[in-house]
Image (cartoon, rainbow, N blue to C red):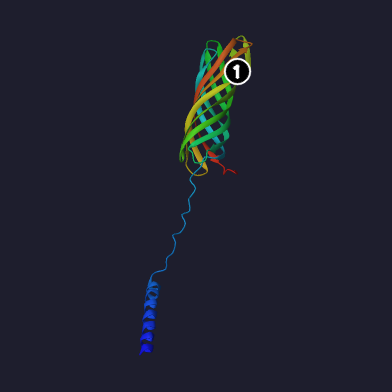
Amino acid sequence: MIRRIALGAVSALAITAMVPAAMAADLPAYEPPAPVIAVPSFTWTGPYIGVQAGYSWGSAARANKDGFLVGGYAGYNVQLDNSPVVLGIETDFNYADIDGRHGRARVDSDWNGATRARVGYAFDRFLAYAAGGVAYADRNLRIRGSGSDSKTALGWTVGGGVEYAATDDVAVRAEYRYNDYGKDRFKVGGRSEYTDHSVRVGVAYKFTSPF
């Protein structure tokens, strides 16, 4: 009798132990969630090269002058880590057709350029920036009946603009600049200053940064 009771107790315990195991086997297998892979956002960091065209107006030797320019630019941007701040350096060189007259005097400029530091604030693919640096240009002064003289002017420039990355590789821009090329002494006409304003549009190809 005692033996039968013991066997019954053992069987009951075995059945009790098997029920949770069977229920666990019926539950769906738990799979951990797939890791989230962060997709890198656009960055302005890297070198670029572009072409631009614009219109310039100003004064030199008391003559109002204006005209068009076309050229190229190249530079390098660095967007600070986890920040919208963009720092850069850029240089450009342009062919110009800028001239003006005042009385017997005629002034013109055939080329200009600048090397500038840039600081900007990025809204993802949109960049607003300010820039300033060294400006240079040729200056030609002719006075009817007295002759002519030419100088290479060196001064400063300041301005700003907006830029938009249409793709990861192509960015378009529009900007304004004020240029002050200082005063030069000519063999004809004496000392003359040269200042101008310009508006420009450009398109650039951005290379993938090696860093």
Residue ID at (39%, 82%) = 10
Q: Quadrant of residue 207?
A: top right
Q: Quadrant of the C terminus?
A: top right
Residue of label 1: 140
Where does the image place residue 42, in percent across and percent down from the top left? 49, 44
Residue ID at (53%, 34%) = 87
Residue 98 visible: yes
- Amino acid under disc 1: Asn
Q: Nearer the viewer, residue 207 or 25?
A: 25
Where does the image place residue 27, in percent across and percent down from the top left? 38, 70
Where does the image place residue 192, in percent across and percent down from the top left? 57, 12
Q: Quadrant of residue 14?
A: bottom left
Would you place residue 160 above or below residue 140 in this image? below
Where does the image place residue 11, in percent across and percent down from the top left? 38, 83
Within 10 Å of disc 1 (Cα), the crowding (few <14, some 14-19, many 20+) is some
Numbered label tally: 1
Would you place residue 148 above or below residue 86 in this image? above
Q: Quadrant of the N terminus?
A: bottom left
Q: Nearer the viewer, residue 23 or 63?
A: 23
